[in-house]
Amino acid sequence: AVSLSTTFISLAQGLVVDFGGISSSTIAMNNAQQAASFVRDSFRPSLVAFSIDLSLNTVTLTFSETVNYMTFMPASIAFQNQQGSTATQSVQLTGGNLIT
């Protein structure tokens, strides 16, 4: 979804059930419904948290919003032993395998 003309939804029957026990109807993929409105994303994703597991050799990054994993650039990450310019040791990633 990047614009109103590219934003549609289809639904499987039973997505929700009302209090009378009646399930929602189906909207088939070949008859998907167009969004009534579309607001473009204007916020940059920010790193909310990260964790390192040295026994599994993994780094987990948590962002403030969904991100396009295909744009991930591991070489843009550096780990350091202190915050800011006082760091005396730094290790920059040179690659890795992305696990989604």
Image: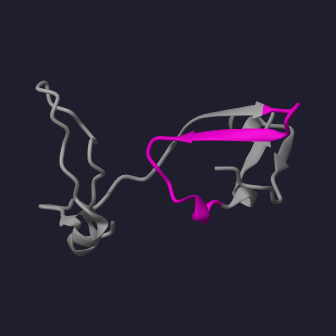
Q: Quadrant of residue 79?
A: top right
Whole-percent x, y for residue 92 in the image: 81, 52
Q: Quadrant of residue 73?
A: bottom right
In the image: residue 1, left or right of residue 88: left
Whole-percent x, y for residue 2 in the image: 32, 69
Please tell me whether residue 64 belongs to the stretch shown in magenta: yes
Whole-percent x, y for residue 20 in the image: 11, 26
Q: Nearer the viewer, residue 70 or 82?
A: 70
Q: Residue furthest top?
A: 19
Q: Residue furthest bottom?
A: 5
Q: Which residues are magenta?
A: 53-72
> Is residue 68 shown above or below 65?
below
> Is residue 35 shown above or below 19?
below
Q: Residue furthest front?
A: 21
| Quadrant assignment for the N terminus | bottom left
At a point 13% along the width and 24% down the height, the residue shown is 19
Q: Nearer the viewer, residue 44 or 89?
A: 44
> Is residue 30 shown above or below 58?
below
Q: Nearer the viewer, residue 16 or 4?
A: 16
At a point 70% along the width and 50% down the height, the residue shown is 99
Please tell me whether residue 32 belongs to the stretch shown in magenta: no
In the image: residue 87, left or right of residue 49: right
In the image: residue 30, left or right of residue 53: left
Scheme of image coloration: one colour
How many labels, in total?
A: 0
At a point 15% along the width and 34% down the height, the residue shown is 22
